[in-house]
Image: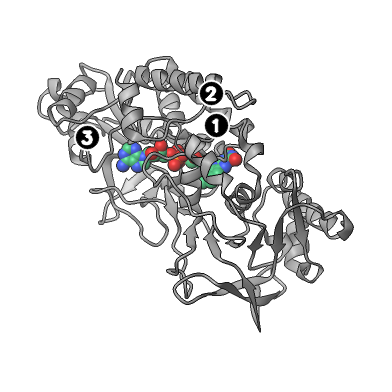
Amino acid sequence: MTDSRPLSVALVGAGPAGIYAADILSKSGLEVSIDLFERLPAPFGLVRYGVAPDHPRIKQIVVALYKILQRGDIRLVGNVEVGKDVSLDELQKHYDAVILSTGSDRDAPLDLPGVDLDGCYGGADFVSWYDGHPDVPRTWPLDAEQVAVIGAGNVALDVARMLTKHVEDLMPTEIPENVAEGLRSNRVTDVHLFGRRGPAQAKFTPLELRELGQVPDVDVLVYDEDFQFDEGSEEAIRASNQTKQVVKTLIDWTLKDKDELTASRRIHLHFLHRPAEIVGDGRVEALRTERTELTGDGNARGTGEFVDTPVQAVYRAVGYFSSPIPGVPFDEIRGVIPNIEGRVLGEDGEWMSGLYATGWVKRGPVGLIGSTKSDARQTIGHLVEDAEAGRLQARADRADEIGHDAMLAALEANGVRYTTWQGWELLDAFEQQLGSEFNGGTTRERIKVVDRDTMTAISRG
Ligand code: FAD
């Protein structure tokens, strides 16, 4: 806290990391005024625009995040992109501290021959489409019958499941109208998911994997020759109950009677296949993989045996990656903001006074929503220490240029059409109303609005 006014703090990004950090800061004992900037007119980050629509239990986390923002002591400033609508420099004039919680929004790069062929897609782009992100195209090509998904984690499972699930089974969810329409023309019959190492090295979580076996009219196939376990695998199974459960589910599937496989769509889980090349002449025609074998410590090496799986589309689901924010240092290799326990480091390796990071942009795109909370605790712990030691101060010369009112006046002067928490409540109610008016024979809690201008217009009344 400064001598005469509360500490003024801006958070950038209203995903779980930003909201949890704001909540922890508000309860830290400091006298503090908190603004939460978000580039979209809707808060909640990847909970709204990453978590799959058929995971309503996870989407319920929104209720907890909603309650935090509904209190009113943390002010949401939506539809404002930091680095575009307002610079970091300007934020630092208005606030004593700035916390970056901008998450991850795109596919990690994959260096693979053929990756630029037509029909090769980023998993994150597909996720953004089916979750109705306002900044992506409204149509998605779903003309491939055979599809490959590269990756052996939960996002790969989401992509495979959303590609095979029949649209009727998604109608009770919040999927936007354009997504339902797109999925109606989906021609897929077979999705092949490829992991480089063995079943014990897959990064699936047990619940999400088991769920794959319960999708109506979709069979899951696994192949006996992919079940290799080395010393490293045995160790992994002993060390982690999660790995043990994943391996058990996969082994159970090997025992399935082939006569039971009668579904019209199939997901094939392949292990010990290293993607070597996406083959095609202008368009994807096949995925070439090299068979691998485990080396004893859970790693894999190529065997020199190559297999071509004929597919017309390839989805890369090898991880997310953060985007740089102008004026903020960025580690291009790891895709994070360089920091020590949340204190952002400048090019000289020193802490950039008053600047912090939290969430996926701080530690990389791994971990579930819950881990953003412990992460936020660490970052806020350091911010509180720095505030108490008198190390925080906005760069503005005059007190009336600092904080919420001055910032909003500056945004208005620059013609930025920002939205507020009250605006989100209007949009939220509108989406729920759309859901309740749906007359397709299904009860729907909400239908998402996807067009940014429409979202903004509804939010601004
Ligand atoms: P994000 O959620 O990405 O939030 C960052 C926010 O910052 C966004 O709202 C973004 O719009 C905003 N932003 C970015 N740049 C700017 C800028 N320049 N100015 C202003 N605002 C900006 N976890 C689970 O626990 N269960 C699941 O089932 C699950 N499913 C997932 C499925 C997918 C496909 C993905 C990708 C992730 C999933 N996760 C799941 C993980 C979970 O989404 C993350 O742990 C969590 O969202 C990370 O939170 P974050 O706040 O760091 O980032």
Residue drawn at 56 percent across, 29 percent down: 61
Name the amino acid type tagged 3: Leu
Residue drawn at 62 percent across, 30 percent down: 172
Q: Viewed as shown, does residue 299 lie left or right of 320?
A: right
Tag 2 near tag 1, CB within 8 Å: yes
What's the distance in space between the residues labelled 3 and 1, CA to CA? 35 Å
- Counting from the top left corner in percent of width and height, residue 166 is at 65, 44
Q: Earlier in the sequence, mark 2 or mark 1?
A: 1
Q: Secondary structure at mark 1?
A: loop
Q: Quick one: 376 or 188, which is closer to the camera?
A: 188
Name the amino acid type tagged 1: Glu
Badge 2 residue CB within 8 Å of ligand 1 = no
* Quarter of the N terminus within the rendering: top left
Tag 2 near tag 3, CB within 8 Å: no
* Quarter of the C terminus within the rendering: top left
Q: Quick one: 114 or 200, which is closer to the camera?
A: 114
What's the distance in space between the residues labelled 2 and 1, CA to CA? 8 Å
- Counting from the top left corner in percent of width and height, residue 18 is at 41, 33
Between circles 3 and 1, the one closer to the viewer is 1
| Residue at the disc numbered 3 | 91
What's the distance in space between the residues labelled 2 and 3, CA to CA? 38 Å
- Crowdedness of circle 2 by 10 Å Cα count: few (<14), some, many (20+)? many
- Counting from the top left corner in percent of width and height, residue 219 is at 76, 53
| Residue at the disc numbered 1 | 174
Q: Secondary structure at mark 3?
A: helix
Residue drawn at 68 percent across, 61 percent down: 201
Give the label on residue 435, or none: 2
- Crowdedness of circle 3 by 10 Å Cα count: few (<14), some, many (20+)? many
